[in-house]
């Protein structure tokens, strides 16, 4: 999408048509975005009724990651898969399905999707979302995973929807990152931010600090140095925000900068953190990079990592470039010194 030429207030369908006119290869991708946006409007209506529509947080079964599925997780999964069934999509990797789902054999695209992100916020009137990445489908009947094993750089488009005070679609087709807000009166998304540009430096970080005792030394050192503020090696005071909803934290970072971290830690099952590569980290990473920000697992670029399973987890650090690079320096210290470096003792990496 040629960001510069998009007019604020334009409808999503008009912007997609313009993108396809400029690049006809985007036709199928645009159809998939339209399908997901349509499903998101219906999910937004369900969420907007809150408890009037029943207990959306009611526990159901378990997904493949061992998380308890809430009623809204299941509703959102049904809505997005129904929509994708009617789009040019061969396969779907959903958080709420154990295996890759085969929809339209021979169709050109594959979609990795987290139908409902931020599940712990369901039922308490807080922001939740839907995250997706669109890739070329690899026509391999014998290996259903084949469409999802390329690195994130293979994504043709990525986005997420936040169901917050406003419902917003954050989207990239590989030419910048845009935000569209749902005009409820009209039932259509309209462009509000034609080109996001994340500030390079920032003073805000997001991490679930209740896990501090389980963190590895580089993360401990990074956060300790943020906490020391202007008196510490970072020479500036930081603020902290953690919404418990990746989409909402990501949208804040996209709009005003900052850094988000969900690192691996020493809890059982958390060596690779909590977030999933295909339908959380890779789409967010594409959106960040297209907005001038960065996304790593602490050291490696997220978009270069190849998945080996659909629910594979990955440590995730994203946001303002200076902060993402700063986190990588703390990891660099650990790697070079095999964990014995004084950098990660009482003193922080950046301290003289
Ligand atoms: O409860 P924790 O460990 O802080 O994890 C919060 C993270 O987990 C998530 O809820 C995971 O996503 P799901 O709700 O889709 O499982 C993220 O949205 C959020 O950033
Ligand atoms: Mg999620
Ligand atoms: Mg989810």
Image: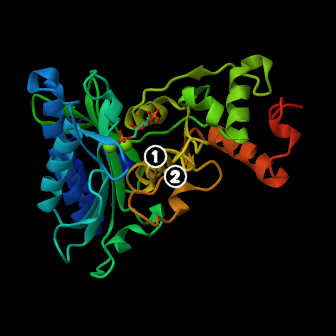
Residue 14, relative to residue 137: is it above or below?
A: above
Q: Nearer the viewer, residue 130 or 286?
A: 130
Q: CA distance from mark 1 to mark 2?
A: 6 Å
Q: Quadrant of ligand 1?
A: top left
Which quadrant is home to the C terminus? top right
Q: How far across and how far down the image is residue 294, in percent?
A: 56, 47
> Mark on residue 275?
1
Residue 273, relative to residue 232: is it above or below?
A: below
SS for callout 2:
loop
SS for callout 1:
loop
Kindly identify the residue that appears in the image at 80 percent across and 37 percent down.
344
Q: How far across and how far down the image is residue 230, in percent?
A: 75, 18
Kindly identify the residue that appears in the image at 82 percent across and 54 percent down.
336
User: Which residue is disc 2 drawn over?
Assistant: 314
Which quadrant is home to the N terminus? bottom left
| First of labels 1, 2 by sequence position | 1
Question: Tags 1 and 2 in contact by the CB under 8 Å rule?
Answer: yes
Q: How far across and how far down the image is residue 147, in percent?
A: 35, 71
Q: Is any atom of residue 261 visible in this view?
A: yes
> Mark on residue 88?
none
Kindly identify the residue that appears in the image at 27 percent across and 81 percent down.
141
């Amino acid at each position: 999408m040629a960001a510069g030429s998009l007019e604020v207030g334009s409808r999503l369908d008009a912007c997609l048509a313009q993108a396809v006119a400029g690049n006809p290869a985007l036709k199928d991708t645009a159809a998939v975005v339209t399908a997901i946006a349509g499903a998101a409007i219906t999910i937004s209506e369900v969420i907007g009724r809150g408890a009037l529509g029943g207990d959306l947080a009611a526990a159901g079964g378990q997904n493949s990651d061992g998380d308890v599925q809430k009623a809204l997780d299941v509703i959102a999964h049904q809505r997005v898969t129904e929509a994708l069934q009617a789009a040019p999509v061969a396969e779907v990797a959903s958080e709420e399905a154990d295996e890759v789902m085969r929809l339209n054999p021979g169709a050109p695209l594959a979609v990795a999707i987290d139908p409902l992100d931020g599940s712990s916020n369901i039922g308490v009137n807080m922001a939740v979302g839907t995250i997706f990445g669109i890739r070329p489908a690899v026509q391999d009947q014998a290996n259903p995973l084949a469409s999802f094993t390329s690195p994130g750089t293979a994504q043709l488009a990525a986005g997420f929807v936040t169901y917050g005070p406003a419902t917003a679609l954050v989207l990239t087709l590989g030419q910048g990152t845009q935000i569209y807000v749902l005009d409820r009166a009209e039932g259509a998304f309209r462009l509000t931010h034609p080109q996001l540009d994340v500030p390079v430096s920032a003073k805000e970080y997001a991490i679930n600090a209740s896990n501090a005792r389980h963190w590895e030394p580089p993360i401990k050192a990074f956060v300790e140095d943020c906490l020391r503020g202007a008196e510490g090696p970072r020479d500036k005071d930081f603020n902290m925000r953690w919404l418990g909803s990746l989409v909402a934290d990501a949208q804040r970072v996209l709009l005003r900068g900052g850094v988000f971290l969900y690192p691996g830690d020493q809890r059982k099952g958390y060596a690779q953190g909590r977030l999933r590569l295909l339908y959380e980290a890779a789409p967010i990473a594409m959106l960040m990079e297209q907005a001038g920000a960065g996304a790593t697992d602490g050291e490696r670029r997220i978009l270069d990592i190849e998945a080996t399973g659909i629910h594979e987890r990955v440590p995730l650090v994203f946001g303002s470039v200076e902060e993402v690079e700063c986190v990588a320096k703390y990891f660099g210290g650990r790697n070079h010194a095999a964990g014995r470096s004084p950098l990660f003792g009482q003193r922080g990496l950046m301290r003289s």
